[in-house]
Amino acid sequence: MKTKLRLTLAFVLLMNIVSCSQAQSETPETTASQTEVTSSGETDTRQPYIEKTDLGGARFTIFAPDWGLYSNYFFADEQSGDAMNDAIWEREMLTEDYLNVDIQYIKEGTINDTRAALSSMVMSGDDTYQLALTHCITPTAELITDGLILDWNTIPTVDLSREYWNQSCNENLSLYGKQYYAVSDYMIADPNAVFFNKELIESYQLENPYDLVRQNEWTLDKLNEMASVVTIDLNGDSVFNENDQYGFYGSETWMYASFFYSSGIHFTEKQDDGSLALSLNNERTYSLFEKLDQLINRSGSTYKPADTTLKLDMSSGKLLFQIEALNRLNLYRDCDVDFGIVPYPLLDDTQTAYETNDWSGLMCIPATAGDTSMIGMVCEMLAYYSEDTTIPAYYDLLLGEKFARDADSKEMLELIFDNVIYDAGMNYFGHSGTMYDLFYSISNLLLKEGSSDFASYYNARETSSQALIEDMLEKVSD
């Protein structure tokens, strides 16, 4: 997702594409040439890496679990008048026309059924699926160690250096020069963000979070400082509960794991020989736990209900900051509270980017896939066409009318999506044994136990976690 994308112009282009689909099918040689307007006002005609090809109507079937974003934002049977649906449909039609292929999909089972589905197909030698979409964590390592998926580097028609392939994924999920998972603009990322109450910012004369982000001053210390100012006992009963006002809240405990990545912390680090090693035992991690302990347990600014059903959200008007999944932003379009969006805060101002992890999924190719040349071409074109179809449509879906004229929120949305990163520690081991404990250590230790003793927590799990990594590496290196 490139920073030069400008949502309004891209959405107009999308509507032009949809209305002209008939004309495009009649003049296919010009289908893949898209004209953009850059920030400087100049036109830029993109050309696809893949040449227009006739693949004779070859079948290209995508497998995905019936889960999350896959259930709503990836597949379309026909045009419906819904902008997102029609953008998905248009992307498929453009790709089918450009390559003369037949794109189909099978969406079934849960994220835990993906391993069995691919294993059954591969063991029988079938070529049922040409592309499989997984969960971000489950069962990614097992698909590799079971020998169920191919190395993307063996696909002759894929160029992973292209701008629509995520380079963090390429770098951090490769093992010994082999890359079993990839992420392109075809995939809709699912990062988390911080929502903030503009009305409280103004009432308490606090600093503008948008400006803090731009000045590289949006840090955990700053969030903590601002959260403490607005936390008050609204009804004066000396009991803090759902009836009072708070500086910070996270409705789901798993959302706290994203603080690792906004703090520049990865669970594993690539070694010179291409292997992986744990990389949590450092001063940045300890500093993160100290700062979050202050916010969550010692400041009184965080809403922590004893009854987890007593949730608050931005629409209550009683929160200054709320961490939330960006894919839920459209659920707040009728919210009466005027709120904005910023990325998770930095650990400190020495960081140069507001990074975030992706809770969406990964792309892989089953080991029994037949025509890998065809597979590569389709994956390239689906990614290529996404810039002018599904990406602007998804942005507009998230922003809705509430944020349509909010240039600041659009800017923050682009910033967040442009800095989505991947980490083998999460993507391969986030649901495995003691690595699971480490991945969710913020919620397990700080929220549930009220403790900031990460050193002891980590030491009790270090050996077994490194063993999990070594076991996978041994199988991959064979």
Image (spheres, grey):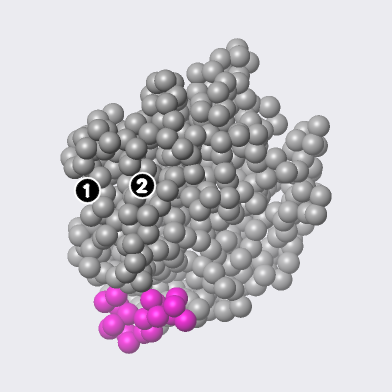
At a point 50% along the width and 61% down the height, the residue shown is 419
Which quadrant, please, contains the C terminus?
top right
> What is the residue that sits farthest to the top in this orientation?
124
Q: Return the residue nearer the eye: 245 or 206.
A: 206
Placement of the N terminus among the 4 image quadrants = bottom left
Specify few, some or many for label 2: CA neighbours under 10 Å numbering under 14, 14-19, or 20 or more: few
Q: Nearer the viewer, residue 118 or 339?
A: 118
Residue beneath the point at 40% across and 21% down: 57
- Residue labelled with disc 2: 33
Residues drawn in magenta: 195-215
Residue drawn at x 73%, y 54% as measured from the top left: 270
Displayed quadrant of residue 307: bottom left
Q: Earlier in the sequence, mark 1 or mark 2?
A: 1
Residue 271 is situated, as x and y percent measured from the top left of the image, at: 78, 54
Q: Which mark is residue 16?
A: 1
In the rendered image, residue 22, in percent from the top left (x then y), is placed at 21, 35
C-alpha gap between disc 1 and disc 2: 13 Å
Tell me if residue 446 comes above or below residue 131 in the rendering. Answer: below
Asked if one can make out residue 176 in the rendered structure from this viewpoint, the answer is: yes
Within the magenta stretch, is there residue 355? no
User: Can residue 395 be seen from the camera position used here?
Assistant: no
Q: Judging from the image, what secondary structure is the residue with disc 1 in?
A: helix
Residue 81 vertical position relative to residue 11 in the rendered view, above or below: above
Mark 1 packing: few (<14 Cα in 10 Å), some, or many (20+)?
few
Q: Residue at x 60, y 34 (%)?
A: 156
Rendered location of residue 252, percent (x, y): 44, 53
Q: Amino acid at mark 2?
A: Ser
**Element at label 2:** loop
Above or below, 411 relative to 165: below
Amino acid type for the residue under numbered disc 1 = Asn
Horizontally, is 88 left or right of 459 in the view? Answer: left
Q: Is residue 416 left or right of residue 12?
A: right
